[in-house]
């Protein structure tokens, strides 16, 4: 499908999302917009390029969130039918999105961070360690790109531990593979967590030292 067709679809999706979120929209128009979006996610062969386009940080938050939901749907329900090249492309694109497509840590919306971390965890659950052996190295590198990236890496590790260890949301063999690999890399993970904590404690202390004391009121 040509790029101009992808652009046209993205425009339609933006309009549909806007209708769904507009409180002045009628129930009929909302349902039609929802149907269009759901059918797109289920059937359209260009979900990935459209999802990536809508997830760009130049879009408004509700559109970005919907774009990321498209990508999450692809990972959860189409992954097994994708080629190896398509999987690698999507993985690299999502990691690039985290590195360069997110806002400052205090500006980025929590629901954007949440769905981004979910996408990565869903890919990890399907690929690591067999097809993504350098995942932890990539996350470590990503965490050094900025505060938003560090926070997202922490969210990813938390959600992965919850899904695998606490909630048991994986088939037995996959859960076993990931648990074993997590155990084997526990020293590296703890080292990363402690270093991250220490770095941020040091930053906080520096801010405290650099902040002048409040002036006393003289009557």
Image: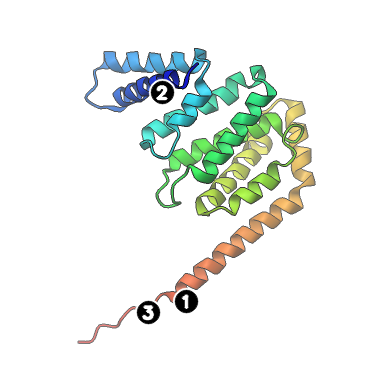
**Residue 208: x percent and y percent?**
46, 73
Compared to residue 99, the image places residue 27 above or below, namely: above
Q: Indicate which label's residue lies in the foreground, 2 or 1.
A: 2
**Residue 112: x percent and y percent?**
45, 39
Q: Tell me the number on the disc at residue 213.
A: 3
* Image side of residue 183 versus residue 115, left or right: right
Residue at mark 1: 209
Figure quadrant of residue 198: bottom right
Q: Tell me the number on the disc at residue 7.
A: 2
Q: Indicate which label's residue lies in the foreground, 2 or 3.
A: 2
**Residue 135: x percent and y percent?**
69, 41
Question: The residue tagged with tag 2: helix, strand or loop?
Answer: helix
Question: The residue tagged with tag 3: helix, strand or loop?
Answer: loop
Residue at 54 percent of width and 49 percent of height: 149
* Image side of residue 83 versus residue 206, left or right: right
* Image side of residue 58 versus residue 165, left or right: left
Compared to residue 74, the image places residue 180 above or below, namely: below
Q: Nearer the viewer, residue 78 or 161?
A: 78
Asked whether the beta carbons under mark 2 and mark 3 sit within 8 Å of each other, the answer is no
| Dot 1 alpha-carbon crowd within 10 angstroms: few under 14, some 14 to 19, many 20 or more | few
Name the residue at the bottom extreme. 219
Residue at 66 percent of width and 34 percent of height: 124
């Amino acid at each position: 499908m040509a790029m101009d067709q992808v652009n046209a679809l993205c425009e339609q999706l933006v309009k549909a999302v806007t209708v769904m979120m507009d409180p002045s929209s009628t129930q009929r128009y909302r349902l039609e917009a929802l149907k269009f979006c759901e059918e797109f996610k289920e059937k359209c062969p260009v979900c990935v390029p459209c999802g990536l386009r809508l997830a760009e940080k130049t879009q408004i938050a509700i559109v970005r969130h919907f774009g990321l939901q498209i990508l999450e749907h692809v990972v959860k329900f189409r992954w097994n039918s994708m080629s190896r090249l398509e999987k690698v492309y999507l993985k690299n694109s999502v990691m690039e999105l985290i590195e360069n497509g997110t806002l400052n840590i205090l500006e980025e919306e929590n629901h954007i961070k949440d769905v981004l971390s979910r996408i990565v965890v869903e890919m990890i659950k399907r690929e690591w360690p067999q097809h993504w052996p350098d995942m932890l190295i990539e996350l470590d590198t990503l965490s050094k790109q900025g505060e938003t990236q560090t926070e997202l890496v922490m969210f990813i590790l938390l959600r992965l531990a919850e899904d695998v260890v606490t909630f048991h949301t994986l088939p037995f063999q996959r859960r076993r593979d990931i648990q074993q690999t997590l155990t084997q890399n526990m020293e590296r993970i703890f080292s990363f967590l402690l270093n991250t904590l220490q770095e941020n404690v040091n930053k906080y202390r520096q801010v405290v030292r650099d902040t002048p004391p409040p002036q006393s009121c003289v009557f």
